[in-house]
Amino acid sequence: MTVLVNGVVTEVAPDATLADVLAAHGVPDRGVAVALAGEVVPRTAWASTRLRDGAVLEVLTAVQGG
Amino acid sequence: MGDPLVIGGREIGSRLIMGTGGAANLSVLERALVASGTALTTVAMRRLDAGGGPGVLALLERLGIEALPNTAGCRTAAEAVLTARLAREALGTDLVKLEVIADDRTLLPDPIELLDAAEQLVDDGFTVLPYTNDDPVLASKLADAGCAAVMPLGSPIGTGLGIRNPHNIEMIVAASPVPVVLDAGIGTASEAAQAMELGCDAVLLATAVTRASDPEAMATAMRLAVESGRLARGAGRIPRRWWAQASSPAVEQDRQDRPST
């Protein structure tokens, strides 16, 4: 199945969890946050969150600004 | 100093809040932040792969400066609320500089969406610092909604036009039950001092320092200006007079060397 990670179509295993997808993308384990379908997924729930085909993920971090 | 800035129950060690946008690189930013003496500094939230300077969080941590995430780029209350929640998750802070912008040309706040977002975030337990128009009525409503401070603009973001409506800022200060932070529009040190003389509790600026020819020197100037303005406000300026008032004793009227009439 495929999911959208920061706007990029990404092929993942059918039983992939959010933690699997983030690990495959090399997402660091601190300083980032993830929204799934417009809702924040707390870090503690990453491993137990199963993704559906077509899931939309946004992975954000802090950058210079303001 | 014995007169600390307190926002939402937490003591902030400097009345100059800095932004990190516009700095040429992290090394320039570091020197400017150190020179400014700031204790609280904004960061923006962006997609992880979007670039834009990874490492700013590590820099702030190393310098002992608290991060103030903003919701820059958000146009609606819903976007701003989600961004604030992501920032809280990523940075582990309930502080948020709430920005909800109406359009790209003016970057002025959208007051309707701003107040809506402020109410939602206060309900959700955030310490909300809203970037707002220099409108005393809106500032009052934001404070009533439970915001921990109000941050009126001096002039639009990045313009360096200074404080275009000083009387509005004074009205906001006179009525505000929470700290007032002059946010946006500062171009040079005299304007930061003016904000403090008008009674603001702090100044937030970025561009004036990060895009100055010498950011480190301008950061020092801003630190001194904020301190000077605060001192002058407390010292009580003299009233303005129409006619001159001599500051030396009057001369005697019958001196020998004057021609007699």
Image: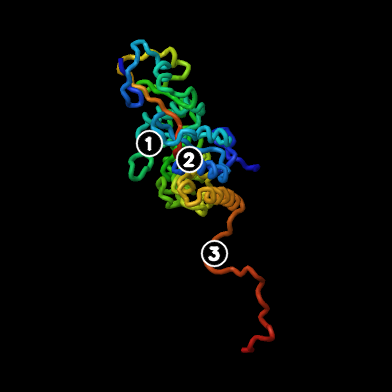
Q: Residue furthest right?
A: B256
Relative to A55, say whether B261 is above or below: below
Q: Are marks 2 and 3 in contact (CB under 8 Å)?
A: no
Q: Residue type at mark 2? A: Thr
In the picture, residue A51 is in which quadrant? top left
Residue at the spot 60% in from the left edge and 54% down from the top edge: B236
Residue at 37 percent of width and 20 percent of height: A36
Say which residue label 3 marks: B241
Give how far apart the Cα atoms at labels 2 and 1 are. Answer: 15 Å
Which residue is the site of mark 1? B73
Q: In the image, which disc is placed on residue B20?
A: 2
Q: Are marks 2 and 3 on the same chain?
A: yes
Q: Nearer the viewer, mark 2 or mark 1?
A: 2
Q: Amino acid at mark 3?
A: Arg
Foreground disc of the pair 1, 3? 1
In the image, residue B105 lies at what x, y percent?
33, 45
Q: Secondary structure at mark 2?
A: loop
Residue B152 vertical position relative to residue B83 in the rendered view, above or below? below
Q: Quadrant of residue A19?
A: top left
